Amino acid sequence: MIDTLRNLPDSPGVYQYFDREGRLLYVGKAKSLKKRIKSYFRFTPRLAPAPNLSPRIYHMVSQIDRLEVILTPTESDALVLENSLIKQLKPKYNILLRDDKTYPYIYLDLKEPFPRLEITRKVIKGKKVRYFGPFPHGARALLDSIYELVPLVQKKGSLKGKKACLFHQIGRCEAPCEGKITPEAYARHLQEALGYLHNQKQLIAALQKRMHRYAQQLRFEEAARLRDRMEAIGRIEQNAADLARREDLDLFAFADNGQRGVLVRLFIREGKVVASSHTYIEAGADPAEVYRQALLDFYTEETPFTASEILTAHPLEGAEELAHIVGERIGRRVHLRHPLRGDKKRLIGLALQNADELLRQKSAQEEPLAPIRRLLDESAPIRRVEAFDNSHTAGEEPVGAMVVYDNGKWDKSSYRRYRLQAKDEYRQMEEMLQRRISDFDKEPPPDLWVIDGGETLRRLALGLLKKAGVTLPVAAIAKEKVDAKAHRAKGSAKDLLYIGGEPLRLPPSDTRLQWFQKLRDEAHRFAITYHRKKRLEREKQISLLEVEGIGPGRVKKLLDYFGSFEAVRQADIQALKKVIGPKAASALYKHLKKVENHKQT
């Protein structure tokens, strides 16, 4: 280790720290690998962590057994590589921001004679496209409410028609498709809509009037719908920001109270805070690392960039390189600054004040999964969990399922289903987990894996993760077997937890065990539902193929040869004859054509 430290290159690149077990601890980037890596250590009288490190980093350095470096041509290249490795490998001591999704914007294409407001999460081509946002919350409610109040063209396809649609009949559109409104008159409606977009308090007041009118007319469902929309729009924060100029700014501020950190994003448009979002981070994170990852995650090639400047609440080393990378992604020059005085400095104060308040509120609530984290002896908070199960019938139609539990609720948009090839449960789980690991670059690893199975499957998962260089805790849950049979007595399920070593027996009343059971049961439900669906599809296909002269043996031949029922259905008579002979092929071909004609009629 000392020899490695003495021979480090004085060039830009990425460094990786590993512990004695070969687990990846940390990924970092440096303009000079030699200077940066040596700053972690004290060399006399013996090699030890540097005394000026934070407690968290000091603890990490004390575990380092070896390091690897990757040289890059420039510091910018090192920055991009560092961000990619962190998201893909999830080192134990790097932070991983969960709020890296693309936020929706509302856009308007002014080249159209009758423009519509629409939602997008990516750049729309066009020189006259105007963007509003981003809107972390309430974009759909905002847009639907504007269309409820202003008679704009309601549907994109409406202009292609030549006849007024239902929206004109109910007074929601003035039928430009029939020429019943001029572009100039339509532009006045558009300005009214933009007024609501810029002033959501005025929009809520208009919705409230309409809601009361609906209630008086006993149209309670419509009134409730407007009430829900107002609540969603109310989440869009819009405050006066005492700016001398009506600028558009994106602001990022990080604060840490020793228990946890938080990153706050403020989006200022025309001098007003139109939206905000925040992400909690474990305590002791390096602010520079937080800002780097936040900016690289937020600004992608698909991000509509509408701000004149990006502000950070702290000075940022390597700000020029970071601004250059972001600028290349979005196709324009980017100004990244840390203001020291004036209105923008006051905005920084506002953002940090919000961050401190969020930390205060968070400290008043205990981390929801703290008991689980302590049970697993993990230092980092557990927020996002993935649970896996597989299902089959005697090895036939094997499928797998992954369910996701995130911040106290099911994230059903992240559920995944897998069609598997392996026949035994061990290989099925291996196949499913390997496919999930291969997607880590697109969907970063969670904070915990839960496997439906025993210690053998848990060790399988750990081995696959280690091979991929990913550090991730894994727990397994299995039914306790009594006389070689799983015990399933309702109300007293004898489930065993495997978190390392001997199985852990918790009483059925233990809330920690119940939490693991809830994850396992949801994964099982999702897996078996998918399995039943695939099995019914196969049975339907088989029954359809079982015409005169086509028995199970020939069905198997056909599926083995063509690969799927759809391929059999599309095969010509000559291909069918090669597999099952002329007579059976002729009967099958006629039957399939008859079924196809029946569907068309």
Image (cartoon, rainbow, N blue to C red):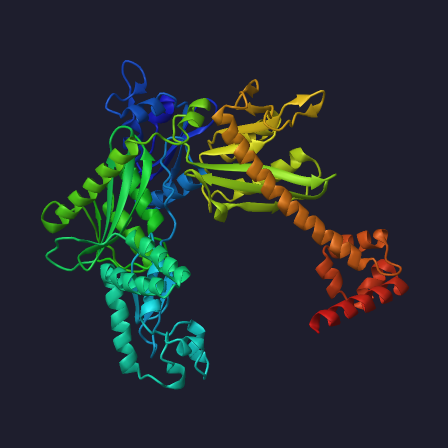
Q: Position of residue 468 (x, y in %)?
A: 51, 35
Rendered residue at 75%/52% (across/down): 539
- Quarter of the rendering occupied by the N terminus: top left
Q: Position of residue 16 (x, y in %)?
A: 39, 32
Where 158 falls versus 493 (above or below)?
below
Rendered residue at 10%/46% (across/down): 341
Q: Is residue 492 left or right of residue 5?
A: right
The answer to whether residue 93 is visible is yes
Q: Residue furthest bottom?
A: 179
- Quarter of the rendering occupied by the C terminus: bottom right
Rendered residue at 16%/43% (across/down): 349
Where 525 falls versus 204 (above or below)?
above
Q: Position of residue 225 (x, y in %)?
A: 38, 59
Count of number-bearing discs: 0
Rendered residue at 19%/56% (across/down): 272
Q: Is residue 565 left or right of residue 585?
A: left
Q: Residue furthest top?
A: 45
The answer to whether residue 285 is visible is no
Instruction: In this rendered view, identify the residue nearer to me: 504 or 88.
Output: 504
Where 26 falls versus 104 (above or below)?
above
**Among the 4 quarters of the image, the one containing residue 585:** bottom right
Instruction: In this rendered view, identify the residue nearer to me: 491 or 11.
Output: 491
Where 279 falls versus 43 (above or below)?
below
Q: Position of residue 582 (x, y in %)?
A: 89, 65
Instruction: In this rendered view, identify the residue nearer to me: 495 or 550.
Output: 495
